[in-house]
């Protein structure tokens, strides 16, 4: 997996990302251009027009990220609107796509104790996008340093920062978009710029998230789930053992008019399966035990470790296990049972 390290001003950070990952960005644009047309019947020009609806919100809440997006576009030699479209793809598709994953947060021991704080997930999407994943490290002035795994061209995804704040994402297929709220992937980026879980949660609840998803936020004190729709956010507190589980459907009721279509029926069984596996780990699981959970293939092809069953279907493209007190993570590229690559990420290296 390509590793991009970017520093400097927001535009410089974006330009480095765009120039070093130009090939992957061009392929990502081609992938989504095709997906928008086949799944949503949207031409590329229509997609770019829709993406522009997010600009006033970005100017109001995160102008530095707007500068970074311009830098990515310039570095990759593509239109700004194309990079913007990648970063607001969840809002544009209006519930048409079905990417997702299975995720788990677990604070071992009592809140505030010396126990470890784990955050982990498998990220599932169509196999052809696997070659366009990058490892992105960002160092910026007066903000936390960030390490994430993302699709090339997207400036917010799954990872952690040097304050020990981490974030995971589950797709949820419920229609509706609120253009005056934070686009999903840029909301993830702002979580990664937060100095604590509480700061991140407060920010998201205040501004809102523009489309349906589940954002799992954690730090050394533990995790909390945020089930987001285009009109509300429901908070999922940890269970009695300090754990939060999620897959690709809403676990609690939302306001009238928010209808979850449960695009993968196996989402219903995966969330129960990961709870069952976690129950079998004991009170102080090891990293190896955590990784074992995400290799589980019960229910194939729609397992926690997902496999392709037909053309256009999704499979697990990477697995990440973060230990947030230690500010470190291990990443397996590909299905965890068939790893293509493995590496560690840490701010202590």
Image (cartoon, rainbow, N blue to C red):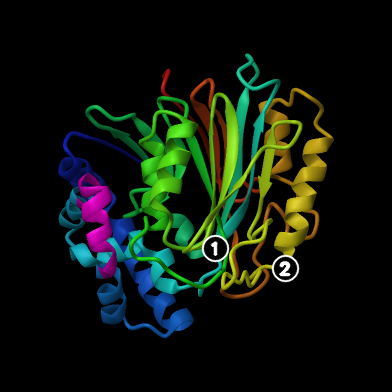
Q: Residues within 10 Å of mark 1 (few under 14, many from 20)?
A: many
Q: Sequence-wise, which precedes: disc 2 or disc 1?
A: 1
Q: Residue furthest top?
A: 114
Residue 253's tag is none
**Residue 62 image position (x, y, % from top left):** 26, 48
Q: Tell me if residue 302 can be seen.
A: no
Residue that appears at 51% across and 75% down = 96
In the picture shown, does residue 86 fall above or below 304? below
59 left or right, relative to 161 = left
Magenta stretch bounds: 53-66
Q: Tell me if residue 28 can be seen.
A: yes
Q: Secondary structure at mark 1?
A: loop
**Image quarter in which the C terminus is found:** top left
- Residue 220: within the magenta? no
320 left or right, relative to 64 = right
Residue that appears at 60% across and 29% down = 222
**Residue 319 image position (x, y, % from top left):** 58, 44
**Image quarter in which the N terminus is found:** top left
Q: Residues within 10 Å of mark 2 (few under 14, many from 20)?
A: few
**Residue 241, quarter of the rendered image:** top right
Q: What residue would you read off at disc 1?
A: 99
**Residue 63 image position (x, y, % from top left):** 21, 48
Query: Please, what is the dominant secondary structure of the magenta stretch?
Result: helix
Which residue is nearer to you in this view: 199 or 74?
199
Q: What residue would you read off at disc 2?
A: 265
């Amino acid at each position: 997996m390509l590793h991009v390290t970017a520093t400097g001003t927001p535009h410089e950070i974006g330009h480095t990302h765009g120039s070093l990952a130009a090939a992957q960005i061009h392929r990502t644009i081609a992938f989504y251009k095709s997906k928008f047309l086949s799944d949503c019947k949207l031409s590329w020009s229509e997609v770019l027009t829709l993406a522009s609806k997010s600009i006033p919100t970005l100017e109001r809440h995160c102008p530095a990220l707007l500068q970074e997006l311009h830098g990515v576009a310039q570095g990759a030699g593509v239109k700004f609107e194309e990079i913007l479209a990648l970063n607001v793809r969840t809002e544009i598709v209006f519930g048409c796509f079905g990417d997702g994953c299975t995720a788990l947060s677990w604070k071992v021991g009592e809140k505030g104790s010396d126990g470890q704080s784990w955050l982990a997930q498998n990220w599932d999407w169509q196999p052809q996008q696997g070659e366009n994943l990058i490892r992105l490290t960002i160092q910026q002035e007066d903000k936390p340093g960030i390490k994430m795994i993302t699709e090339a061209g997207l400036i917010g995804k799954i990872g952690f920062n040097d304050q020990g704040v981490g974030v995971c994402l589950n797709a949820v297929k419920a229609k509706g978009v609120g253009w005056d709220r934070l686009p999903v992937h840029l909301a993830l980026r702002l979580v990664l710029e937060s100095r604590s879980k509480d700061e991140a949660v407060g920010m998201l609840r205040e501004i809102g998230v523009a489309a349906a998803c589940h954002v799992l936020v954690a730090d050394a004190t533990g995790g909390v789930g945020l089930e987001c729709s285009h009109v509300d956010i429901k908070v999922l507190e940890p269970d009695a053992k300090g754990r939060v589980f999620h897959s690709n459907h809403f676990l609690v009721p939302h306001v009238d008019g928010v209808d979850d279509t449960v695009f993968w029926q196996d989402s219903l069984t995966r969330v129960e399966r990961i709870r069952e596996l976690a129950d079998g780990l004991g009170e102080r699981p090891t990293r190896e035990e955590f990784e074992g959970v995400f290799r589980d293939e019960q229910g194939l092809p729609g397992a926690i470790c997902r496999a392709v069953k037909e053309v256009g279907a999704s499979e697990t493209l990477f697995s990440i296990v973060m230990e947030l007190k230690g500010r470190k993570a291990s990443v397996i590229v590909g299905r965890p049972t068939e790893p293509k690559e493995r590496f560690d990420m840490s701010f202590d290296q």
